[in-house]
Amino acid sequence: MASGPPFDLTVTHEGLDALVRAIRREEDGKLLRKELAKTMRDALRPGAAMAKSAIMSMPSAGTGMGPGLRSGIAKKIRPEVKLGGRWTGARVKAFKTPGLRGFTNAPKRTNRRDGGWRTLSYGHEPWRTQTGKRQWFDEAFENDSARHLAAVHTAMEDMARRLAARAR
C-alpha cells in the first residue's frame, strides 16, 4: 500500500491461493468466491471501525469551513478483499481522499511520525505546518491484529471445510 498508511493486515499465503483455485473448479465457484470475500470483509470490519474511531478522536482546530478532515478520512477506511489477480489477500486500507479540499493523501499525512503537512492559513499566505494524531491507523490495530487475522483464517477454513464436504 504505497499511498496510504504503512499498516497492512494481509493474508497472502499459499493456502488462500489454493482455496481460490479450488473454488474456481466448482460449478458455483463465482458465488462461493463472493461469499468467501464477504465473510473475510466481515471479519475485518471491527478493525476498520477501530481505525475510524481513532481518526475521529484526532483533535480538531477547525474553522468550520469546508468538509471535515476527520470524517472525510474515516469514510475512506474500508476492509478490502481480493481473490485472484496480481494480489490476493485481505486488508484494511485507508484509501486516498481526492475530494477532501485537495488533500489527496490525508490518511497518509495525518498518520506520519514526522512533520505533518503544510497548509495555507484560511486559503492565503502564510503557510503553516499542521500535525495530526500520529500513528492513529497503526495504533488502532496494535492490540487486536491477531484476533482479526484469526477471524480471516477462520473464514478461509470454513470455506475449505465446505469444499471438502462436497468432494466426499
Image (cartoon, grey):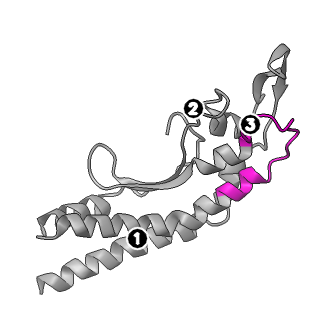
Q: Give the residue number, with chain letter if any, for mark 2.
A: 98
Question: Residue visible at 64% across and 34% down?
Answer: 100
Magenta includes 8?
Answer: no
The question of residue 57 being in magenta is answered with: yes
| First to last magenta residue range | 51-69
Q: Position of residue 94 (x, y in %)?
A: 57, 46
Q: CA distance from mark 1 to mark 2?
A: 29 Å
Front of the two marks 1 and 2:
2
Q: Earlier in the sequence, mark 1 or mark 2?
A: 1
- Residue 158 to residue 74: above or below: below
Type of the residue with mark 3: Arg
Q: Using the image, tell me which numbered label, if any, was put on residue 144.
A: none
The CA span between labels 2 and 3 is 22 Å
Residue 149 visible to the viewer: no
**Viewer-proximal residue among 132 and 124:** 124
Q: Mark 1 — residue?
A: 39
Q: Which mark is residue 113?
A: 3
**56 in relation to 120, above or below:** below
